[in-house]
């Protein structure tokens, strides 16, 4: 089985992954004790993570340890930085990195955002599957999950799941 790049991300119903000023507070409306929306099972299927520098810094700024330090983590950045354990600050070509990872043996590759990384991966047709959790809110403004200027991409619906707090999770595979 070849490795797949899987985007696993949450968005508002109107397509925003953050409100202005990188505000993620709207995500809390679906928090529920004992419910992780399949996240723990998902991360067991991956051993590499690709994430943008802004997303990485946002997580760190919230007082959390980087949650994927136990995996090969690639922080995509334009500014070289010293690697920290398995966390690598990658300044090279994103397609080259993904092609390299896909050629190696291992589990799937998790794209954890942000919008810039998703856009670059889509421009190169490098995302194989999309698991998108839709939060029941229209935030009106902020950081769009899917930026304009990417190629058309046909998808096949794999599954949908509905949860008690109104979150709906959509799972798609690329058809081409």
Image (spheres, helix red, strand yellow):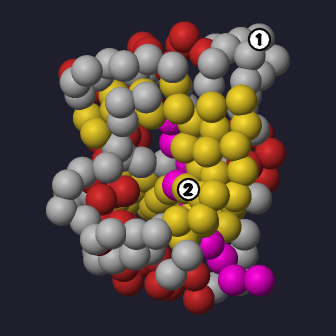
Q: Which mark is residue 33?
A: 1
Q: Position of residue 150 (x, y in %)?
A: 25, 65
Q: Residue at x 34, y 43 (%)?
A: 145
Instruction: Answer above or below: position of 145 versus 148.
Output: above
Q: Which residue is mark 2?
A: 130
Q: Position of residue 72 (x, y in %)?
A: 59, 62
Neighbour class for label 2 at 10 Å: few (<14), some, many (≥20)? Answer: many
Residue 85 visible in the picture: no
Q: Residue at x 35, y 30 (%)?
A: 14
The segment highlighted magenta reads 1-10
Neighbour class for label 1 at 10 Å: few (<14), some, many (≥20)? Answer: few
Per the image, label 1 sits on a secondary structure element best described as loop
Q: Residue at x 45, y 33 (%)?
A: 11
Instruction: Answer above or below: position of 163 versus 55.
Output: above
Q: Residue at x 63, y 85 (%)?
A: 104
Residue in front for this viewpoint, 4 or 94: 4
Q: Nearer the viewer, mark 2 or mark 1?
A: 2
Query: Distance from label 2 to label 1 (Cα)?
Result: 25 Å
Return the disc, 2 or 1, that comes first in the chain's sequence.
Answer: 1
> Does 50 sit left or right of 19 as displayed?
right
Most prominent secondary structure in the magenta stretch?
strand
Count of number-bearing discs: 2
Quadrant in the picture for residue 56: top left
């Amino acid at each position: 089985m070849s490795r797949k790049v899987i985007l696993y991300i949450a968005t508002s119903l109107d397509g925003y992954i953050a409100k202005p000023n990188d505000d993620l507070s709207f995500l809390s409306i679906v928090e529920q004790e004992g419910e992780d929306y399949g996240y723990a099972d998902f991360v067991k299927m991956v051993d590499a993570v690709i994430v943008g520098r802004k997303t990485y810094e946002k997580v760190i700024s919230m007082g959390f340890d980087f949650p994927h330090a136990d995996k090969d983590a690639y922080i995509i950045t334009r500014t070289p930085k010293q690697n920290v354990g398995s966390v690598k600050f990658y300044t090279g070509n994103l397609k080259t990195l993904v092609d390299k990872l896909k050629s190696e043996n291992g589990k799937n590759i998790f794209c954890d955002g942000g919008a810039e990384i998703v856009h670059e991966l889509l421009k190169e047709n490098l995302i194989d599957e999309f698991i998108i959790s839709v939060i029941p809110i229209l935030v009106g403004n902020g950081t769009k999950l899917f930026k304009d200027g990417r190629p058309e991409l046909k998808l096949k619906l794999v599954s949908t799941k509905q949860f008690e707090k109104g979150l709906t999770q959509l799972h798609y595979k690329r058809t081409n």
